[in-house]
Image (cartoon, rainbow, N blue to C red):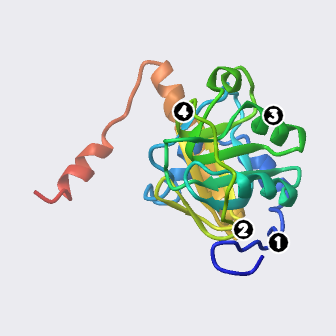
Amino acid sequence: MTQFGARRHPSSPQADARHIEALRQIPLPLLSDNLHRGTGSVGLQQYSKPTKFTMAGTAVTVRCRGGDNLTTLRAFDDCRPGDVLVIDAAGDLTNAVLGGIMSAGGAMLGLVGIVVDGAIRDVGEIREREFPVYARGANHRGPYKNGPGEINVPVCIGGMVVNPGDIIVGDQDGLLAFPASEAAALIDKALAQQKKEEAQMAEIRAGRWDRSFLDALEAKAIN
């Protein structure tokens, strides 16, 4: 498929497995803070059972018409173990594009998560599983299978641009995507911040909370 509206590109190389494993141990807010707090999705939520690990994997992207999952079904052919399938369904909530069967199939294929900017169904079933599923909403009405759609093109998920091959991470606080080339530096910064926050928590548990930094912040505040 080459014409506009029906493009299918090969999946991008997968991110370094060492970076993925490190990201699985880091809460999303630490990563977000070190990406200037201005990126990430808005309006999507986790529907699967939460775990202590952050979802992290390489993005395989789909852009489809709202309520239609023909291209998403084909995109499973382009997914590898360790990938996250990222579906831009234009935020449409009139018909679900994914449910219990497709999410179970993705888990069986070795995906580490599925993200849908659109509707899903079989929520009760999905909530019982630890396989990460994120979506904008839910609707019992099932999908059409007419197409067209595109695979491995830039997509928009809750206002966040996701490019094929980006690393996408998620936990109960939301979703974040960034180029794989930025992973090493981001991990270092997040781990450094984590140590600082752990020290602050230790002080609070000991009955202390140093808020003297507020004086400097207020001094430079623009009123």
Q: Nearer the viewer, residue 211 or 71?
A: 71
Where is residue 75? Give x, y as percent.
78, 58
Pinpoint residue 135: horizontal percent, then vertical percent.
57, 41
Numbered disc 4: secondary structure: loop
Quadrant of residue 48 within the rendered picture: top right
Which numbered mark, 4 or 1, is in the foreground of this view?
A: 4
**Which residue occupies the foreground of this view, 76 or 115?**
76
Q: CA distance from mark 2 to mark 3?
A: 22 Å
Q: Residue at x 83, y 63 (%)?
A: 14
Q: Residue at x 64, y 54 (%)?
A: 87
Q: CA distance from mark 2 to mark 4?
A: 26 Å
- Residue 195 appearing in the image: no
> Which image quarter is the N terminus in?
bottom right
Query: Considering only order in the chain, which callout, 4 or 3, is on the residue closer to the N terminus?
Result: 3
**Could you say which disc has been placed on residue 152 in the image?**
2
Earlier along the polypeptide chain: callout 2 or callout 1?
1
Above or below residue 98? Residue 184 is below
| Closer to viewer: mark 3 or mark 4 | 4
Sequence-wise first label, 2 or 4: 4
Q: Which residue of the protein is positioned furthest toward the bottom in this rendering?
A: 3
Disc 1 element: loop
* Residue visible at 81% across and 34% down in the picture: 104
Marks 2/1: CA–CA distance: 7 Å
Marks 3 and 4 in Cβ contact (< 8 Å): no
Q: CA distance from mark 3 to mark 4?
A: 18 Å
Residue denoted by label 3: 104
Q: Are marks 3 and 1 in contact (CB under 8 Å)?
A: no
Q: Are marks 2 and 4 in contact (CB under 8 Å)?
A: no
Residue pictured at 30% horizontal, 40% vertical: 212
The first of marks 4 and 1 along the sequence is 1
Residue type at tag 3: Ala
